[in-house]
Amino acid sequence: MQVKEIFSSQLPVGETLSIKRSRFEPLQKSDNLKRISIVSGTHGDELEGQYAIYLLTSWLNENQDAISGIIDIYPAVNPLGIDTITRGFPLYEVDLNRVFPGGEDGFLPGQLVHALVQDIKGSDIAIDIHSSNIFLREIPQIRINKEFSNFTLPLAKELNCDFIWIHDAVTVLEATFSHTMNSLGTKTLVVEMGVGMRLTKEYGEQLLCGMLNLMKKEGIITTENSFEAREPFLSEIGEVFYLNSPSSGLFVPALDHCAIIKKNEKIGTIVEPLTGATLDTLYAPNSGILFTLREFPVVYEGSLLARIFGERDK
Amino acid sequence: MKIIEIANFTSLNRAPLVIEGYLFEGSDPYAPSVAIVGAMEGKNILPLYSASKLVDFLKNKIHDKDKIRGNILVIPSINSYALNINERFWPLDKTNINTMFPGYELGETTQRIAKKVFDAIRGYTYGIILESREDLSNCIPYVKLFKSGFEDIEGAKTFGFRVVNHRELTPVDTVTLQYNWQLWETKAYSIVCPNKNQIDIDNSNEIFEGIIQFLSKNKLIDYRVLNGFESVIAAQEDIEIAKAPKSGIFITMKKEGTYISKGDVIGQIVHSLNGEIVHTFISTCNGMIVCCYKNGLILEGALAFRIIKSD
C-alpha cells in the first residue's frame, strides 16, 4: 500500500492541508488492471464512510494476495471539515460537492476538487460514500442519476445496499463529484447511509460486504471468499412519499427507522415544551418502508421528517 | 407606501421570522416596475443597508410622490434569523436561500421561503438582487450577469458601476434568484457588494447612487442624477488572477478600485512566525484591482487579487 498526497495547501500558521490517497495494487504489477476509486469525507459532518473505508483498508491489508486490480482510497476529501465538525470547506463555507469539476485557476475549494478529479480520472469505477446529514437517518442506499443508470445500475445492485434510488437529472447536481466522474467515463455510485456525525457499525459492515462483492465481480480482487449482496428495493417499482413538518416545534418520533408501516399509521408528533401543547400529529401518507427518519428533533415548517418507499395504496 | 407581509414562519423558541416588503405604488400605470431584494444571507450587511437606505429615500426624500412613476417593491431582509446571530446561511440547516429558487411550497423550509419571496416578486419588469461576494474577497461594487441567454447587458450598464461582470453560467447558478427571475421574464441584475462587516460609507454611497441612477434612467422615478461610470463589460478572459504561492500573513499594498501598472508592488505575504517576507505580489499587467483577498491570514493557492486588464 502506498500513500500519496494529491493536493496540498500550506495554512497560514505552521500547518499543511493535505488530501491523501492510499493505493492498493497487486504485488505483481501488470498493464490494463481495473481501477476502483473510493471516496468519502466530502462533507465534514459525514463520518459513516470513515468506518466503512477503515474496514476495507483493514481487509485489504490482511488479504494482500487477493488484490488483482488497483484500489484507490480517498477517505477524507475535506480533512479540515472532518476534524472540525464542519460540513463545508472551512473558511470558505462552501459545499465541496457543489463545486465540481473545479479548476486550477478557481478559488481554493475549486482547486482542491479539480486535483481530486484529475487523480481519479481514468478509474473504471468510483464509489462516493456519504452519510446522511445530521438531521436524517437513512438506510444504506445508492443514489443514481437516470442519465447514467444504464451502466451504473448493474454495479449498484452488487453493493449490498437496501435501496436504489434512481432520480431524474437535475442541472444543479451537475456540480457534484458523481456527475463529473460519470461524464468523464468513470462509472460512479453514490452511497448514502446512517446519520451525520455518528458511525453505524452494522451499516459499515454491510457496505464492506458490498464493496468486496462488487470488486470480486469486477475482477479487482480474486478470492475464494463469497460475499452475498442483498436484493435492493428499486425506486422504479414504487414511489417515494415525503413527509415535511407542517409546523415548527420539537419532533418526537413514534416509530423506529426502517419500520414497515401502514398508511395512516402514526409517525410522530410535533410538540411545544413551553406549553405542553401537541401542535401536530403526523401520519403515514402511504404504506411502505420508513427509509428516512428525522434524527435531529428541532424542526421548522417544511423540515423533512420522513420518507416512505412503497407501491401507491389503492 | 405600504408594508406587505411576504412570509411568516414560526420557530420553536425564536420570535417568528417575518419577511416584509415596502411597496411604493407608482403614479403612472404604464411605467415599468422594479423589485429590489436585500439580504438573503446573514452577512449581507451592505445589501441590508443599501435596501433600507432606499426605503428611507423613497419614503422621506421624495416629497412629490408623483415622481415615483412605477411600482417599486423593496425587501430589505429575507434572512433576519441569520443576520441576528451573524450566521451566513439559514441557521438550522445552513442552506443558502439563494440556491432554492424558484422555491417549492411543499419542500424544505428554505424552499418554502424562496417560494413565498418569488411569488411576491414575479412579474416585475426589473429585478435587483443585492448580494455579497461568495469567496473570501472584497471588491468594488459591480453588476454580475450570468450568460444565461436571458440577460440584459444594456440595462446593467444603466447602474453606472465601473464593471459589469458577464460570466459563464454554472450548474449551481440555475437555482439562484437571478437566473429564475430572468427565466420568468424579469430583467434581473445582481449588484455584488463588498463583503464587509461594517458599513463602508464610500461603498454604500456608490451602491445607493447606482440604484438611484438605474431607477431614474429606466423611468421608475423622476429624479435628476449625475451620470455614473461608463461600465466596462468584463468576462473571465479580461481578468488577471494572482494566486498566493505561499501561506502566511497577507498585506495588501493596493486596495480594490486602484489603477495599477505592470511591475507595481501590490501586496506581500509575511511568514507568520519569523516575520520574513516570503512573497511579493508584483502586477503582471496594467489595469484595475477589482477584488482583494480580505483576511489577514492567507492560504497557499488562495486567490489574492483579481485585476481587470486595461490592455
Image (spheres, rainbow, N blue to C red):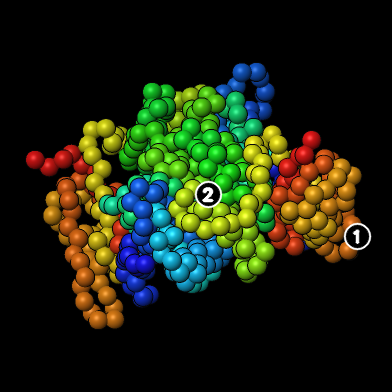
Q: Residue at (44%, 60%) from the top-left corner?
A: B67
The reply to whether label 1 and label 2 mark residues of one chain is: yes
- Check disc 1 and report the residue beneath it: B276
Which three-letter amino acid code belongs to the residue tagged 2?
Lys
Q: Residue at (51%, 53%) from the top-left corner?
A: B216
* Quadrant in which the N terminus of chain A appears: top right
Q: Residue at (55%, 26%) from the top-left corner?
A: A184
Mark 1 to mark 2 CA distance (whole Å): 52 Å
Depth order, front residue of A175/A39: A175
Classify 10 Å Cα crowding around label 2: few (below 14), some (14-19), many (20 and above).
Answer: some
Position of A297 relative to B226 (above/below): below
Q: Quadrant of residue A226?
A: top left
Classify 10 Å Cα crowding around label 1: few (below 14), some (14-19), many (20 and above).
Answer: few
Which three-letter amino acid code belongs to the residue tagged 1?
Glu
- Check disc 2 and report the residue beneath it: B217
Residue at far top of view: A31
Residue B271 percent coordinates (x, y): 85, 59
User: Which numbered dot is residue A84?
Assistant: none
Left/right placement of residue B81 relative to residue A92 reads left
Q: Which one is closest to the eye, mark 1 or mark 2?
A: 2
Does the image show residue A12?
no
Residue B170 percent coordinates (x, y): 53, 38
Depth order, front residue of A174/B113: B113
